[in-house]
Image: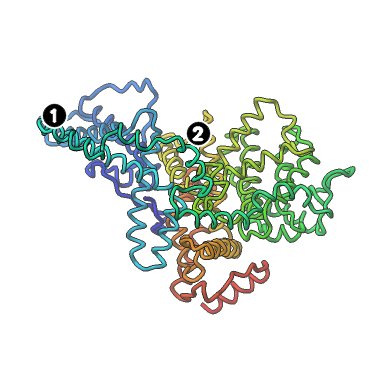
């Protein structure tokens, strides 16, 4: 697994990995050519490098004439000239190493199943190595164990499928063993069968006769009605807990019907003769204009200040300014008044009482995605429709978020978990809400899109919002790392994004990076976002304690250590992702990586020196920008 080990002497980030590839071939080490820096960790890129080595060795051993009819480019220097005698020691060494490398490549190719994406190999490898590291990391103390559990449960796809597959494998193994035993004792079959039938334990006909009654269907329906999700008597208590939860979190379902009336009456919704420069009237238009002129295209826009200056309309104003700046309203014939009306509806459907997943977070993700799109390496890569899709997805990606996790909804049997079959529950709900608001009167911002374009846009938005499910993190990272390393070992150093699958993959990782960008923002903003997220976690933990449920990792306000958790979060989750993104768009994102590493060092320093537990701090204070500046300067002066 790629983890942050520190900065190299050149200022770049170093990575490490382990692999089963032949050590004699140098696949696990730094490639000799200066154009490929770091360690190649994804299996597909490793195979490419090995095949390039084999090609060079073949040319040298056979003195074959290189025609390069397929325009092959490699990361290596030209093949050494000079014939080798077949009986020389150099010839034998090269031949043996080449054979070993070829056999390793064949073994890797055997592991690729039909129609299985090659990035699955990287995903499996990353997941295996990360699990190994987290298990070792979590053995140190209780707080580290909690951090390890949080990362595993949040950023790795559920292990339930793995457990199910293992159980199926176990059943098949028992069946095979039983079959072998059956064949070896065939002489005893008659007596054994007679005994089974007489005891009534294994006779299929006897079971059917005894269990099927005229009342089966009605009794089953009654059972389901009483227990909702379970089949045992003990589930009645859980049903009551679920009912309590559904009552307490009814804002998920009632918000939609009421939010259409909750748009601020003091805001110009676009029905007047003109639209304000920020889409809505604000009490600080000039100051807001100054902030947007200076910072809209920069890393680290202070969304909290924008929200204050816009009187609580950070999402509407940021979205309006970005869409106008990119000329998307004109390109897609979007009525500005309809656009503002839609933004206000979406903004009001976010819950202001949710500390983190609110409209300010959506505005922050939107502005971050806007910044990432400006990378020079991505110039002229995406179509206008693809840019529209990723920015729109950022606007709506958490709409109507209740402030609890997918797993919480699943564990409590919430109606949304039932509706979406436990799969990306909240992400599917956000999409439903966003598209449903489009159907409301004077809210269809895509009314002038042709049918085909509209369907394409919808498909992209769905793929992008589903990519914000944090359980997809490792899969997204594996895909991105495979793409980056394939670009490296191809020799050209250029991205080939001629097909939709590759471009949507980049956009999925872009919105995922934007969603995990807080640790890479200026420290003052990062700390404020952290306080909000931790408070949201604690509120979920309070709900779980009230419902007598097991408290989720990082949600127990009595045991969480914020500083230590942030260091681990950066090391195991954020840094590998941002390092890979920086490799993709190099050198455009180096500032982001540097800021991330500086913030990590700040938290590590305070973990060692202060040892302050969250239980001593009570609920995190949602401070103003000025208060944060004062706090940080005071703290810095004391350290």
Q: Position of residue 414 (x, y in %)?
A: 55, 50
Res 493 quadrant in image: top left
Q: Residue at x 65, y 28 (%)?
A: 453
Q: Nearer the viewer, residue 580 or 120?
A: 120
How many numbered marks have been drawn onto this rendered protein structure? 2
- Residue 502 is marked as 2
Q: Nearer the viewer, residue 362 or 435?
A: 435
> Relative to residue 291, is residue 614 drawn left or right?
left
357 or 578: which is nearer to us? 357
Farthest right residue in view: 273
Residue placed furthest toward the bottom: 638
Residue wearing tag 1: 85
Please give the name of the residue rendered at 57% of the width and 34% of the height, measured from the top-left corner: 381
First along the sequence among labels 1 and 2:
1
- Describe the element under mark 1 as helix, strand or loop: loop
Residue shown at the point (70%, 47%) measured from the top left: 256
Q: How is the image coloured?
A: rainbow
Residue 294 on image: x %, y %: 71, 54
Label 1 and label 2: CA atoms lie apart by 46 Å
Q: Is residue 111 toward the left or the right of residue 367 in the image?
A: left
Q: Quadrant of residue 335?
A: top right
Query: What residue is at 36 percent from the left and 28 percent from the top?
Result: 114
């Amino acid at each position: 697994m790629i983890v942050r080990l520190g900065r190299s002497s050149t200022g770049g980030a170093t990575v490490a990995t382990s692999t089963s590839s032949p050590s004699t071939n140098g696949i696990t080490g730094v490639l000799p050519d200066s154009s490929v820096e770091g360690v190649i960790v994804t299996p597909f890129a490793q195979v490419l490098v090995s095949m390039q080595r084999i090609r060079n060795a073949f040319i040298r051993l056979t003195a074959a004439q290189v025609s390069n009819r397929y325009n092959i480019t490699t990361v290596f220097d030209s093949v050494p000239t000079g014939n080798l005698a077949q009986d020389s020691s150099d010839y034998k060494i090269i031949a043996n190493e080449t054979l070993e490398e070829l056999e390793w490549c064949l073994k890797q190719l055997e592991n690729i199943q039909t129609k299985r994406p090659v990035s699955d190999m990287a995903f499996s490898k990353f997941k295996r190595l990360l699990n190994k590291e987290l298990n070792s990391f979590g053995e140190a103390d209780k707080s580290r164990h909690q951090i390890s559990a949080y990362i595993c449960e949040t950023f790795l796809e559920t292990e339930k499928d793995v457990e199910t597959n293992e159980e199926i494998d176990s059943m098949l193994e028992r069946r095979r063993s039983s079959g072998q035993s059956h064949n070896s004792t065939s002489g005893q079959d008659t007596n054994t069968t007679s005994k089974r039938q007489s005891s009534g334990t294994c006779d299929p006909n006897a079971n059917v006769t005894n269990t099927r009654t005229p009342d089966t269907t009605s009794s089953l329906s009654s059972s389901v009605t009483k227990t909702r999700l379970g089949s045992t008597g003990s589930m009645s208590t859980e049903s009551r807990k679920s009912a309590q939860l559904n009552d307490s979190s009814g804002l998920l379902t009632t918000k939609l019907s009421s939010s259409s009336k909750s748009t601020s009456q003091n805001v110009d919704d676009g029905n007047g003769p003109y639209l304000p420069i920020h889409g809505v009237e604000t009490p600080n238009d000039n100051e807001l204009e100054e902030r947007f002129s200076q910072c809209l295209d920069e890393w680290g826009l202070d969304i909290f200040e924008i929200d204050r200056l816009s009187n609580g309309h950070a999402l509407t104003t940021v979205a309006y300014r970005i869409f106008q700046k990119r000329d998307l309203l004109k390109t897609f014939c979007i009525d500005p008044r309809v656009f503002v009306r839609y933004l206000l509806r979406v903004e009001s459907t976010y819950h202001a009482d949710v500390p983190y997943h609110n409209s300010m977070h959506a505005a922050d993700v939107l502005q971050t995605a806007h910044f990432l799109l400006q990378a020079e390496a991505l110039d002229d890569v995406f179509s206008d429709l693809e840019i529209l899709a990723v920015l729109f997805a950022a606007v709506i990606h958490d709409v109507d978020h209740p402030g609890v996790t997918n797993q919480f909804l699943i564990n409590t049997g919430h109606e949304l978990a039932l509706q979406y079959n436990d799969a990306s529950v909240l992400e599917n709900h956000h999409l439903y809400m966003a598209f449903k608001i489009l159907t409301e009167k004077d809210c269809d911002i895509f009314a002038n899109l042709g049918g085909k374009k509209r369907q394409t846009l919808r498909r992209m938005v769905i793929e992008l919002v589903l990519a914000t499910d944090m359980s997809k993190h490792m899969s997204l990272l594996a895909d991105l790392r495979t793409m980056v390393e394939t670009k490296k070992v191809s020799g050209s150093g250029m991205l080939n994004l001629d097909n939709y699958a590759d471009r949507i993959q980049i956009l999925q990782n872009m919105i995922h990076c934007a969603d995990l960008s807080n640790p890479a923002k200026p420290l003052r903003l990062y700390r404020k976002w952290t306080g909000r997220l931790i408070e949201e976690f604690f509120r979920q933990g309070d709900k779980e304690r009230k419902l007598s449920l097991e408290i989720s990792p990082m949600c127990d306000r009595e045991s969480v250590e914020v500083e230590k958790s942030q260091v681990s979060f950066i090391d195991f989750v954020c840094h590998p992702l941002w390092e890979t993104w920086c490799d993709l768009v190099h050198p455009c994102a180096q500032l982001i990586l540097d800021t991330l590493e500086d913030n990590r060092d700040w938290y590590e320093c305070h973990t060692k020196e202060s040892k302050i537990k969250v239980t001593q701090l009570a609920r995190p204070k949602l401070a103003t920008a000025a208060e944060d500046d004062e706090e940080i300067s005071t703290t810095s002066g004391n350290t």
